[in-house]
Every structure is written in structure tokens, then in C-alpha cells.
Image (spheres, rainbow, N blue to C red):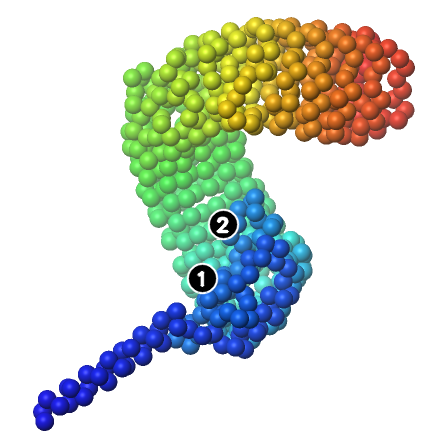
């Protein structure tokens, strides 16, 4: 008899175990019928062009519907993931619109609602959302809402996450309602107009658990803030106050936010020197104070920010002096952006010893100079090098060939007086953007195939025949060099695929010959500049196939004949410059009647006839001259 009890209990335990397993198995859930019909009414009020909610059918269990999550035990709807997940190409097709139905109120256990990146056409945020008392997460980012943010949102007393950013004209008159959201951890109001609320800082700094605050582009102004001198954020790790108008020095309270990991003060009118107190933010990983009016040196205390990964100081024209030595010991630094400052000094290989993680070095527009050994192998692998107007020459920087991850290379105006080495063009074929303009770099590119999306080799000493292009090239600027030979092989070259070329500028060279009738192969072209060469012949009819052409510059050549009627097909043409050629005949009437054509230069040709400017819009810039 002693052993009978375990024998009896064993099947009972098996039964209970299987029952619990069934209850907790999401595949066995059956949704609440009332909530299913509420969701169907909600769907009916929406516009759904991409049919994203096709699984929402009366014959299907709503817990299995796309974007619906149910509680594993009760089967009640607890989450709606309706944010638009599609990229820019498919965004409009798949975005939801229409109306937000109050049928949502019947989802009494709904704790998560994401409607982000849809479009509700400027309608106001439904005030009934403030009655959904179970909500802990509400994301209304970029859904096209407009008007006054309803104070009823303050009734969501259990809310942890609220994002109202990037909508169409949302504004707040009084933030008093937000004080009731005592458990808030994330507040996003980017683009919401807060300029009427003078107590905004007190309102948003009273949450003991707030860790992220996003107030970019909120029209905040220190002159309309009651107490910008003090704030009490005890848990804040992420603060974004970018694109406002504070017009003062950085307030001292900000340097007391000892938990900050990310701080963006980008594009305000902050002024004064950056305080040495910056070094107190020892956990900071991301700092951007670009596009302000700071002056003076970079504080040496920046070396205390040992976790710093990204530093943005760009476009503060009065920041001067040298980069402090303490900065070069920030071994976690991945992005250094000091573009458009007045920094000076010489950078050598010694400075980079600790920066093995550096990916972006953006120093354009400064007076910094590179002085490194020709055999130097950097410890980093850059993705972006922007050093326009910095001194890197006169020798071509050999260390570049060690950089296998470059996406963008800009060493324009960098004092290079040298021949581009043979290794460079093979190395460069994997770089998305190349900018070498305004140097004295030479070399014969006849056998080179350019494969980059954007290429600017203008104002150098390159020579020989024009290089060949891959279909990937979108922008080609090789103006003001010494290229010579016939232009036809370039224009009629065969490619493995449809050309993506949109902008071509090969002006101010020594090219000769006629324009071949091959323009139909360059159907993506929007800007064509062939001026100041030795070209001749007539404009080929196929140039009229460039229906997206916006600018055509053929000045200072020896073209002749009439303007072809096919050019009338270029409906978006905004600039045409045919001056200093030998064109003849009557100028087509459409040239003066096309409303998009704002700049016309036809002087120094052999046109005949009478031309009146009486019907031309006043914004035209035109020059017929000695026709």
C-alpha cells in the first residue's frame, strides 16, 4: 500500500503537465471573438493599398494574423505591430492610411501599439488612445498626424515608451499632461512644435526612469524657456536636442548627466567655448556638437571620454588650435569629424597609433597637414576619408593602398603634385566615391575603366584619350584636364548593362571630332557639359532621346547647323548654353516658350531672324548676342 500513492500521482502529474503544455503552446491559442471583430472593424476603417493585412480574415484565428500578438495563456490580443517595415522604394505602396477606429478600445489588454511610418493624412491623434489604459508602448512616429497633441495621452499611466516624432505639424501648448506618465523610459517628440511651452524642461525632467529623450527640431528656444539653467535627469543615457535655437552657452546641468551615453546638440546656435567639464561625461560614446558657433580650442578633458566612439565637431568655424594629444588616446574612436573648423597643425603616424578602430576621418576644410612615412601602414581600415583642402602632398599618399574598406575618398585641393600610381586605379575600382579635384595629378587614363558611382577628377593634369566607363558610374567630372583625341569612341562605347550615368562634365579639355548619334545609350543623363573643347559637327538627333535632360552646355566649340527639333522632347531642360559656336538658322520658338528653361545662352553664333523677349518670364536669364 505504501507504493500505491506514487503510482496514482504519476498519471495525474502527466495530465497536468500536458494540460499546461497545451495552454502555453501558441499554436493552440484561439483568439477572443469580440477582439477579432474589433480588429476587423479597425481594418475596415483603414486604407491598405499593399494588402498588408490580407491575413486578417473572419475565417482565421486572429492570433495567427500578421502583426497581431496574443497572450500565450489567455489568447487576448496584447500587441499590434503595424509599423511600415518597407524601405523607401515600397513605402508608399505598403503604408496604411484612412482612419484609426475606436474599435481599438475593445482590446482591453493591448499593451503594445506600433503604427509608425504610415500616413494618416494630417488628421489629429485620436484622443481615445488616452483611454487605452493597458498601453505600455505607443509608437506614432511619422504617421502623418497633425494638430494639437491630445492631453488625454496623459491618462496612459503605465506607459513606458512614447514616440510622436516626425509627423505633419504636431504641436503642444502645454506639457502638463506628461507629468502623469510616471514610468516613462523613452520619450520621442522629434519635430513636434514645443515653442509655446516655456516649462518644457521642467516637464520632461521629472521622470526618475527616463533613459532616452529625443527633442530634435522642436523649435525650442532658450529665450522662451523658463529655467534652462537647471534640469534633473537621474537616469538619462540618450539626449537629442539637435536642430533647435538655443543661442547660448551649453548649460552646466548638462555636464552633470553622468550616465549619458549619447549626446547630440547638432545645429543649434550654442556659442562660447566647450567647457572642460565635458570630461565628466565619462560613459559618453556618441557626441555631436556640429553646426554651432563654438570657439576656442577643443578641451583637453575630452581624453577622459575613454568610451567615445563618435566625435562630431564639424562646421564650428571658430574652433581653433590643434587637436589635443589626449584625443589621440581614445582607442574606441570610430568616427572623427572636424570638418569646417579652423584647426591647424601636423598629423603624423604617431598620432594614429591607438586608433585601430577608426573608420571615418573627416577633416575637410581645416588647415591640418598630413606628414607620414611613405612606407606607413595605418592601424585602421577607413570607410570614409574626407580631407578636402588639407595638405597631403606633394607625393601621392601611398598608404591609401592599405585601405581595403573605403567607400568615399576625398583628397581634393590637398596639394598633390604627382603621377597617379598604377596600383591606384585597380584599388580605386572598389570605392563608391572618388574626389581628387584641384590638384596637379597626372597620368594617362586611356586604358583605365572607371567603376565608381561618383568620380571627380576635375582640374588636374590627366591626359590621353578619355577613360572607359562601367555602367555603375552616375556622376563623371573630368573637366579642366588635358584629355585629347576623338570623342566618338567614348560616346559609343559598349557596356555590359544599361548605363546609370546622370551627370557628365568633360569641358575644358582638348577633345575633337563630332558627336556621334549614340545618345540613346545614355538615357539616364540629366546634365551634359562638353564646353571649351575642339568639337565640331551638328547636334545629333538622338540627343532628343534624353527626356530627363536638365542642363546642356556645348559652348566654345565649333558646332554648326540648326538646333535639332528633337531637343524639344527634353521637357525638363532648365539650362542651354550653345554660345560661341557656328550654329545657324532660326532659333526654335519652343526655346523661348518653355517655362522650365530658365537660362539660355546663344550668343556668338550665326542665327538669323528676329527675337523678341516680350513673352519671356522675368526670371529668364538669356543671352542671344551676336546671332
Residue 43: which quarter of the image?
bottom right
Relative placement, left or right, of 10 versus 390 is left
What SS does tag 1 mark? Answer: loop
Please give the residue where the numbered disc 2 appears in the rendered image.
240
Badge 2, how many Cα within 10 Å: few under 14, some, many 20+? some
- Farthest residue to the left: give it: 2
Q: Residue at x 60, y 18 (%)?
A: 505
Kindly tell me whether residue 532 is visible in this rendering. Answer: yes
Answer with mark 2 or mark 1, whichever residue precedes in sequence.
1
Q: Residue at x 53, y 71 (%)?
A: 59
Q: CA distance from mark 2 to mark 1?
A: 15 Å
Kindly tell me whether residue 196 is visible in this rendering. Answer: no
Residue 585, given in percent of the width and then of the height, sits at 83, 11
Q: Name the quadrant of the N terminus.
A: bottom left
Q: Residue at x 83, y 19 (%)?
A: 588
Q: Residue at x 54, y 19 (%)?
A: 494
Relative placement, left or right, of 599 versus 242 is right
Along the line of sight, which residue is nearer the eye, 37 or 308?
A: 37
Along the line of sight, which residue is nearer the eye, 488 or 120?
A: 488
Residue 554, given in percent of the width and then of the height, sits at 69, 14
Q: Name the quadrant of the C terminus.
A: top right
Mark identifier at residue 237: none
Please give the residue where the numbered disc 1 appears in the rendered image.
185
Along the line of sight, which residue is nearer the eye, 257 or 376?
A: 376
Residue 580: which quarter of the image?
top right
Residue 468, given in percent of the width and then of the height, sits at 51, 16
Amino acid at each position: 500500500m505504501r507504493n500505491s500513492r506514487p503510482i496514482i500521482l504519476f498519471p495525474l502529474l502527466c495530465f497536468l503537465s500536458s494540460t499546461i503544455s497545451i495552454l502555453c503552446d501558441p499554436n493552440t491559442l484561439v483568439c477572443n471573438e469580440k477582439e477579432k471583430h474589433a480588429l476587423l472593424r479597425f481594418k475596415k476603417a483603414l486604407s491598405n493599398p499593399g494588402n498588408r493585412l490580407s491575413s486578417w480574415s473572419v475565417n482565421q484565428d486572429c492570433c495567427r494574423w500578421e502583426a497581431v500578438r496574443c497572450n500565450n495563456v489567455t489568447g487576448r490580443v496584447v500587441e499590434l505591430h503595424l509599423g511600415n517595415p518597407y524601405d523607401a522604394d515600397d513605402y508608399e505602396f505598403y503604408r496604411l492610411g484612412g482612419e484609426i477606429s475606436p474599435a481599438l478600445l475593445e482590446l482591453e489588454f493591448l499593451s503594445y501599439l506600433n503604427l509608425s511610418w504610415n500616413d494618416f493624412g494630417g488628421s489629429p491623434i485620436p484622443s481615445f488612445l488616452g483611454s487605452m489604459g493597458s498601453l505600455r508602448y505607443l509608437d506614432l512616429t511619422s504617421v502623418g498626424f497633425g494638430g494639437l497633441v491630445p492631453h488625454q495621452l496623459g491618462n496612459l499611466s503605465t506607459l513606458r515608451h512614447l514616440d510622436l516624432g516626425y509627423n505633419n505639424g504636431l504641436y503642444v501648448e502645454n506639457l502638463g499632461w506628461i507629468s502623469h506618465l510616471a514610468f516613462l523610459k523613452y520619450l520621442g517628440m522629434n519635430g513636434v512644435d514645443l515653442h509655446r511651452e516655456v516649462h518644457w524642461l521642467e516637464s520632461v525632467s521629472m521622470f526618475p526612469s527616463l533613459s532616452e529623450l529625443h527633442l530634435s527640431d522642436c523649435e525650442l528656444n532658450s529665450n522662451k524657456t523658463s529655467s534652462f539653467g537647471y534640469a534633473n535627469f537621474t537616469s538619462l543615457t540618450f539626449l537629442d536636442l539637435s536642430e533647435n535655437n538655443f543661442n547660448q552657452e551649453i548649460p552646466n546641468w548638462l555636464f552633470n548627466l553622468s550616465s549619458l551615453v549619447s549626446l547630440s546638440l547638432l545645429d543649434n546656435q550654442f556659442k562660447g567655448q566647450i567647457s572642460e567639464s565635458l570630461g565628466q561625461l565619462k560613459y559618453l560614446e556618441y557626441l555631436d556638437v556640429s553646426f554651432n558657433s563654438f570657439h576656442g580650442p577643443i578641451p583637453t578633458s575630452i581624453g577622459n571620454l575613454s568610451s567615445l566612439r563618435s566625435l562630431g565637431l564639424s562646421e564650428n568655424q571658430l574652433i581653433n588650435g590643434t587637436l589635443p594629444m589626449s584625443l589621440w588616446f581614445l582607442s574606441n574612436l570610430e568616427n572623427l569629424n572636424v570638418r569646417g573648423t579652423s584647426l591647424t597643425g601636423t598629423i603624423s603616424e604617431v598620432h594614429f597609433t591607438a586608433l585601430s578602430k577608426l573608420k571615418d576621418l573627416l577633416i575637410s576644410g581645416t588647415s591640418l597637414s598630413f606628414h607620414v612615412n611613405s612606407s606607413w601602414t595605418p592601424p585602421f581600415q577607413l570607410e570614409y576619408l574626407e580631407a578636402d583642402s588639407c595638405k597631403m602632398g606633394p607625393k601621392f599618399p601611398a598608404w591609401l593602398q592599405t585601405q581595403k574598406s573605403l567607400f568615399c575618398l576625398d583628397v581634393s585641393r590637398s596639394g598633390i603634385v604627382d603621377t597617379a600610381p598604377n596600383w591606384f586605379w585597380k584599388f580605386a575600382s572598389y570605392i563608391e566615391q572618388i574626389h581628387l579635384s584641384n590638384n596637379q595629378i597626372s597620368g594617362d587614363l586611356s586604358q583605365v575603366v572607371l567603376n565608381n558611382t561618383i568620380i571627380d577628377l576635375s582640374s588636374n593634369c590627366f591626359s590621353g584619350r578619355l577613360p572607359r566607363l562601367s555602367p555603375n558610374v552616375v556622376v563623371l567630372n573630368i573637366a579642366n584636364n588635358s584629355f585629347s583625341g576623338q570623342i566618338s569612341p567614348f560616346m559609343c562605347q559598349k557596356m555590359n548593362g544599361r548605363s546609370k550615368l546622370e551627370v557628365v562634365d568633360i569641358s575644358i579639355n582638348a577633345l575633337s571630332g563630332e558627336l556621334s548619334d549614340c545618345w540613346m545609350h545614355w538615357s539616364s543623363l540629366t546634365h551634359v557639359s562638353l564646353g571649351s573643347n575642339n568639337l565640331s559637327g551638328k547636334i545629333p538627333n538622338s540627343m532628343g532621346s534624353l527626356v530627363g535632360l536638365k542642363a546642356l552646355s556645348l559652348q566654345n566649340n565649333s558646332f554648326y547647323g540648326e538646333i535639332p527639333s528633337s531637343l524639344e522632347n527634353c521637357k525638363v531642360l532648365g539650362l542651354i548654353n550653345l554660345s560661341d559656336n557656328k550654329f545657324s538658322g532660326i532659333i526654335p520658338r519652343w526655346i523661348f516658350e518653355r517655362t522650365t528653361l530658365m537660362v539660355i545662352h546663344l550668343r556668338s553664333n550665326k542665327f538669323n531672324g528676329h527675337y523678341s523677349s516680350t513673352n519671356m518670364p522675368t526670371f529668364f536669364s538669356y543671352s542671344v548676342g551676336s546671332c
